[in-house]
Amino acid sequence: MTRHLFLLTGAGISAESGLGTFRDAGGIWSRHDLDEVATPEGFARDPALVHGFYNARRENCLGAHPNAAHRALTRLQAGFRGEVTIVTQNVDDLHERAGTAGVIHMHGEVMRALCAACGARWQAPRVMAPADPCPACGRAATRPDVVWFGEVPYHMDRIADRLSRADLFAAIGTSGQVYPAAGFVAEARAAGARTVELNLAPSDVAGAFDEVIVGPATRIVPAWVDRLLA
Ligand code: APR
């Protein structure tokens, strides 16, 4: 019997909502230089460029709607007889807007702002700029509350605890290329969990999973949730 379900979601779950993925053909990292827009060094060099990149992503997010896969996870959370942990690498808020509660955003949230000087956090305005003062300390050190390459993802202690107790682990719409999230499947397996990948096509790391379910998230996630709740 499955008592603790651990779900890791990635850009693929939001793809059919119109938010691009990173590493697919034509993906975000084929159009933007990751070193310039998603590292602390890039932000130090050109904060306006980085704010512009995340302003565009925030705008996309505001114009997008949750899809059937996000909604299926809300249904799973409500109907599953046991604990459900949902960790996302996504900075969008589509899980929340689909009604899922308690989602752990390990890579932060594009709708939130962070002061690099004092650590205050607040709801991001639609457009952020380098000169924006922090509402708490007044310094112009505001940044999107997202985790950049070279930074430590959020909530890692909580995630490690949940992984150690998982008996079913599922990775949904993620390429498994970015650590530490890419290592979760091995951690869950070491803890004794069965592991499932749900993806448009088997990822390069599909061999690490006990089962691979292939297809668009809006089709395969609701069907998989039906199975789990049956
Ligand atoms: N349904 C299911 N899976 C899909 C769909 C879809 N409709 N469309 C694409 N995918 C799959 C792709 O096949 C790919 O394996 O989603 C995956 C997306 O992979 P990436 O673009 O690498 O995104 P992700 O794994 O979330 O990236 C991890 O990298 O740059 C960072 O911080 C960023 O959080 C992100 C992290």
Image (cartoon, grey):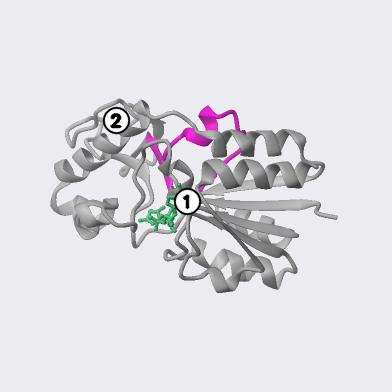
Residue 88 location in percent, x, y?
Answer: 52, 48
Give amino acid for label 2: Glu
Identify which residue, 34 or 67, lies in the foreground: 67
**Could you tell which of marks 2 and 1 lies nearer the N-terminus?**
1
Identify the mark at residue 195; answer none if there is no mark. Answer: none
Question: Do the residues under discs 2 and 1 have CB atoms within 8 angstroms?
Answer: no
Q: Can you give x and y, in whole percent of width and height, for residue 162 in the image?
A: 68, 55
Query: Left or right of 216: which side holds 45?
Result: left
SS label for mark 1 = loop
* Location of residue 58 with respect to 205 vertically, above or below: above
Find out whether residue 186 is within the magenta segment: no
**Label 1 lies in ligand 1 vicinity (Cβ under 8 Å):** yes
Residue 185, position in %: x, y?
Answer: 60, 66
Dot 2: what SS?
Answer: helix
Look at label 1 and name its amino acid: Gly
Q: As drawn, is 175 to the left or to the right of 225? A: left
Give the CA separation, mark 2 to mark 1. 19 Å
| Residue 222 screen position, x and y as percent | 63, 40
Q: Residue furthest right?
A: 1
Left or right: where 186 falls relative to 142: right
In the picture, the disc for residue 10 is: 1
Tell which of 86 and 157 is nearer to you.
86
Q: Residue at x 36, y 33 (%)?
A: 61
Bounds of the magenta segment: 92-111
- 98 drawn magenta: yes
Give the quadrant of the N terminus: bottom right
Q: Residues within 10 Å of mark 1 (few under 14, many from 20)?
A: many
- Identify the residue position indicated by label 2 in the image: 59
Residue shown at 35% from the left, 26% from the top: 63
55 shown above or below 211: above
**Under 8 Å from ligand 1: the CB of mark 2?**
no
